[in-house]
Image (cartoon, grey):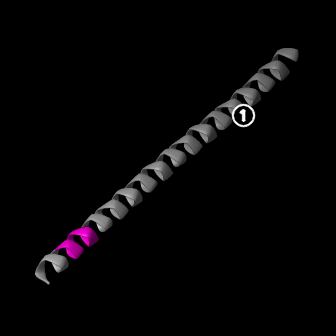
């Protein structure tokens, strides 16, 4: 009977660890995606600034 209790405890702890490990890997993936999103937003802001600068330069040369 003791072997069944011990094996049940081992399986339960293994499942808890597996769930914890998966949760941490999902959180890491989420952080990576957030970082990529912020990088894309920064790149868009840079491109918008470049476009505005180019438009301003064109206006100055036309006047």
What residue lies at 33% left-to-right and 60% top-to-bottom?
Answer: 46
Seen from the viewer's position, the closer of residues 32 and 56 is 56
Seen from the viewer's position, the closer of residues 17 and 24 is 24
What residue lies at 54% left-to-right and 47% top-to-bottom?
Answer: 31
| Residue 40 at x, y percent in the picture | 38, 56
Seen from the viewer's position, the closer of residues 50 and 62 is 62
Q: Quadrant of residue 20?
A: top right
As for residue 56 lying within the magenta part, the answer is yes
Left or right, 27 with reference to 9: left
What residue lies at 78% left-to-right and 25% top-to-bottom?
Answer: 8
Q: Which residue, given by chain and number where applicable, does mark 1 sit on?
A: 16
User: How many labels, in total?
Assistant: 1
Left or right, 21 with reference to 62: right
Considering every residue shown, the one lying at the far bottom of the view is 63
Q: Main secondary structure of the magenta part?
A: helix
Considering every residue shown, the one lying at the far left of the view is 62
What residue lies at 23% left-to-right and 75% top-to-bottom?
Answer: 56
| Residue 42 at x, y percent in the picture | 40, 57
Left or right, 53 with reference to 38: left
Q: Secondary structure at mark 1?
A: helix
> Which residues lie in the magenta part?
51-57
Left or right, 30 with reference to 54: right
Q: Quadrant of the N terminus?
A: top right
| Residue 19 at x, y percent in the picture | 66, 37
As for residue 11 lying within the magenta part, the answer is no
In the picture shown, does residue 59 fall above or below 15? Answer: below
């Amino acid at each position: 009977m003791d072997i069944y209790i011990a094996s049940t405890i081992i399986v339960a702890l293994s499942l808890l660890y597996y769930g914890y490990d998966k949760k941490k890997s999902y959180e890491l993936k989420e952080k990576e995606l957030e970082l990529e999103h912020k990088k894309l937003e920064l790149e868009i802001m840079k491109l918008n600034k470049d476009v505005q600068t180019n438009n301003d330069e064109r206006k100055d040369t036309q006047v």
